Amino acid sequence: MLKVLGAAAAAVAIHGAAVAQERPSVRVTVVTLDEVRQGQVAYVQGLIDGLGGRWGGFWLTRSDTGPYAFRSCRDDRAEYAERCVRFGVQAGGMKHDHQGVVLIVDDAPPQRPDRRGGEARVVCVGVGEAATDVRAQAVDLWPDAARVHGSNDLERDRAALTACVKAALAEAPRPAA
């Protein structure tokens, strides 16, 4: 009996190690624009925390680049903020950090045709000069999803943010000159 339990424990440990290797490590920096409200930031931060941890798709680690590195990028429009963050990533040391992602959180009305999502927009920026997947790297989230409509909308937001981070991680860095 003990041999069976020992073999089962070893199989679980090996499976756990394999799953751990499948999860990419990512360092996240969050930059909020001037118009964003505390509730939106708290919702997005909760989604980010959910991407890591025991059941998440990533291993989240502390970024060496804090949000204050991008304080000059806190514009009232996400398009300008994205350009500013991309410039900061290329000019700073982060361009060699292939695990680094900057999330720009904006206060935005829904952009989707079904009018679901919105009131929080996240743009995921990696180390490349441009987004690899523009649609995936700019997502509309709905901060009231968990409170009002239950888990379907919350899971949609988690999936969208996961795709956003994965697309940002896939950006190719600019070749060295």
Image: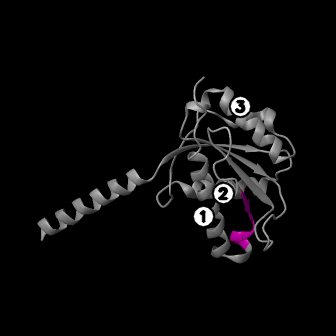
Residue 41: % across, % down: 74, 53
Q: Position of residue 60 (x, y in %)?
A: 53, 47
Residue at image x 81%, y 39%? 74
For this rendering, which residue is in front, 52 or 87?
A: 87
Q: Which mark is residue 136?
A: 2
Give the amino acid type for the residue marked by disc 1 in the picture: Ala
Where are the magenta residues, as a range? 139-147
Q: Secondary structure at mark 1?
A: helix
The answer to if 149 sits in the magenta stretch is no
Residue extending farthest to the top is 177
* Amino acid type of the residue that numbered disc 3 sits on in the rendered structure: Gly
**Residue 159: image tag:** 1
Q: Residue 92 appears in which quarter of the rendering?
A: top right
Front residue (pair 149, 108): 108
Q: Which residue lies at the image location 22% right of the left edge and 59% below the top edge?
A: 10
The C terminus lies in which quarter of the figure?
Answer: top right
